[in-house]
């Protein structure tokens, strides 16, 4: 009898151990601090961004990673395009390709292709609804590649766009012509103001005709086209279950053309160097739209030539919108994609993502990189400003002001990110280059004719007429359909 009781007691003890061990395995998904699990991350950060990211990984490995048995190793693969190429080659198992990482930074186009290959983890299984509710809903929506895919791109660091203005030169112009910054709140008002600036600067040298200066430039023309189309009531691409429809409403595209192509051809807008901040540094333009990360490069001085440089003050404004429309702003910035593997590695990736996006840590990374935090509670300018103080980054006034404006946009504008599909990267490239290149070609041709003595108004009227638009529109539609795979 005693022996039976002893056996029963031992059996109960063993069962208890098994049950608790099973619970522990389920809770930790197989992680063991005594046998650490290594996860690899590929990203595109370089310079200061990479340094900050590496420092945070070191902190994670020494704290939470050490406690739970996770070791993170990260590598920069250069540019975002180089990263995308390397990731897809690895997932395809191309000859000479490296072993695929456990997690990689990606824009929606790359994540979409990887997901179609069956390689991407739906992260909703590792996050509770309460945890996900802490993130900006628009950022999570972008990570849902389609309505049924789940969360395939996890938001880690985002950016949007702002308008940067050379306030020093603006004030001189504004006083002379009676214009106000309120006019810059719409694309129509911006174009009208840019025309006044051209006329104002042309009049400064009455003995030299037609030498007015451009007022404005923007870094991403694709964002202007994509967000503008959405704002005007129709997206260029509608992707559903892999089926894509391209919308090319003529009235919508005419408004986009009128507010970018026309002022560009007339010399009111300009794109001369690699980035518009480079144009602003040498006085080619005094206003620009750029990403929040790009705002850090807005100049503190303008150098007109080797002998003359003067300091300027900058002003940050919200991105213009079309008159009579609901305000929209782009959301951009790569998120993290977790590659399907074994459960403990997938879970380990989720542990790192939760840790990395905690409020204070997210803000610390943001103020050192120009990206925006991804949690709702961190999208507060007072918290971000305090982060600048903590990180000793107070000297970068342009970036701090840009982030203040960007946070206001994030909290008050509609956020927009185009849904990806198989050819969306090529279609976006077309939108980014076609209107820009054709406007530049038309501008150069018109400028040459004007320089050779033809009347400026007569020449320009040819390039921006209804007939010119109709011809341009037909080529645009054909080119977009070809680029978009339709």
Image (spheres, rainbow, N blue to C red):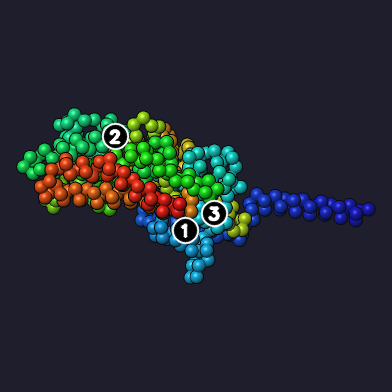
Residue that appears at 38% across and 50% down: 478
Which residue is the site of mark 2? Answer: 188
First along the sequence among labels 3 and 1: 1
Check whether the beta carbons of the residues at disc 2 and disc 3 lie within 8 A of each other: no
First along the sequence among labels 2 and 1: 1
Q: What element carries label 3?
A: helix
Question: Considering depth in this image, is 373 or 450 the residue closer to the camera?
Answer: 450
First along the sequence among labels 2 and 3: 3
Residue that appears at 16% across and 35% down: 172
Question: Considering depth in this image, is 82 or 17 the residue closer to the camera?
Answer: 82
Residue 41: % across, % down: 49, 57
Spot the residue most to the front: 467
Which residue is the site of mark 3? Answer: 115
Question: Considering depth in this image, is 243 or 395 the residue closer to the camera?
Answer: 243
- Of marks 2 and 1, the one in the foreground: 2
Mark 1, residues whose alpha carbon is within 10 Å: few (<14), some, or many (≥20)?
A: many
Residue 284: % across, % down: 20, 46
Give the number of the disc on residue 105: none
Does residue 350 appear in the picture of this structure?
yes
Residue that appears at 19% across and 48% down: 446
- Of marks 3 and 1, the one in the foreground: 3
Does residue 271 appear in the picture of this structure?
no
Q: Is mark 2 on a helix, strand or loop?
A: helix
Spot the residue most to the left: 207
Which residue is the site of mark 1? Answer: 42
What is the spatial separation of the Cα atoms under label 2 and label 1, in whole angstroms?
42 Å
Mark 2, residues whose alpha carbon is within 10 Å: few (<14), some, or many (≥20)?
A: many
């Amino acid at each position: 009898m005693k022996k039976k009781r002893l056996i029963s007691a031992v059996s109960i003890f063993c069962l208890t151990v098994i049950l608790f061990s099973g619970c522990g395995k389920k809770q930790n998904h197989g992680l063991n601090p005594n046998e650490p699990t290594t996860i690899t991350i590929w990203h595109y950060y370089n310079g200061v961004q990479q340094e900050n990211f590496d420092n945070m990984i070191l902190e994670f490995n020494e704290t939470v990673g050490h406690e739970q048995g996770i070791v993170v190793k990260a590598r920069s693969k250069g540019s975002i395009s180089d990263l995308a190429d390397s990731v897809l080659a690895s997932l395809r198992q191309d000859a000479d390709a490296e072993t695929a990482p456990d997690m990689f930074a990606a824009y929606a186009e790359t994540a979409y292709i990887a997901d179609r290959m069956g390689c991407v983890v739906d992260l909703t299984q590792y996050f509770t609804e309460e945890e996900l509710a802490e993130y900006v809903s628009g950022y999570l929506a972008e990570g849902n590649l389609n309505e049924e895919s789940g969360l395939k791109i996890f938001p880690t660091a985002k950016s949007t766009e702002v308008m940067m203005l050379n306030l020093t030169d603006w004030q001189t112009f504004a006083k002379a012509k009676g214009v106000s910054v309120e006019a810059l709140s719409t694309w129509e008002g911006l174009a009208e103001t840019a025309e006044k600036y051209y006329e104002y600067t042309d009049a400064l040298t009455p003995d030299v005709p037609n030498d007015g200066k451009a007022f404005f430039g923007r870094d991403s023309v694709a964002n202007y086209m994509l967000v503008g189309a959405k704002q005007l009531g129709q997206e260029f691409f509608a992707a559903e279950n892999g089926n894509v429809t391209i919308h090319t409403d003529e009235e919508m595209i005419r408004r986009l053309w009128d507010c970018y192509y026309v002022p560009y051809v007339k010399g009111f807008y300009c794109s001369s160097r690699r980035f518009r901040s480079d144009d602003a540094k040498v006085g080619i333009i005094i206003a620009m739209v750029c990403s929040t990360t790009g705002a850090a490069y807005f100049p503190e001085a303008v150098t007109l030539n080797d002998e003359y440089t003067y300091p300027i003050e900058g002003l940050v404004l919200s991105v213009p919108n079309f008159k009579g429309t609901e305000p929209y702003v782009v959301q951009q910035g790569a998120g993290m994609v977790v590659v399907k593997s074994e459960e403990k590695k997938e879970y380990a990736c989720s542990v790192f993502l939760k840790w990395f996006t905690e409020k204070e840590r997210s803000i610390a990374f943001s103020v050192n990189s120009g990206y925006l935090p991804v949690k709702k509670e961190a999208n507060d300018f007072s918290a971000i400003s305090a982060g600048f103080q903590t990180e000793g980054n107070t000297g970068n006034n342009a970036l701090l002001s840009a982030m203040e404006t960007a946070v206001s946009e994030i909290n008050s504008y509609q956020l927009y990110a185009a849904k990806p599909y198989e050819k969306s990267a090529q279609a976006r490239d077309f939108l980014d280059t076609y209107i820009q290149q054709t406007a530049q070609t038309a501008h150069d041709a018109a400028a040459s004719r004007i320089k050779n003595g033809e009347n400026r108004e007569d020449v320009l009227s040819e390039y921006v007429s209804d007939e010119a638009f109709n011809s341009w529109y037909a080529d645009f539609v054909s080119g977009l359909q070809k680029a978009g795979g339709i």
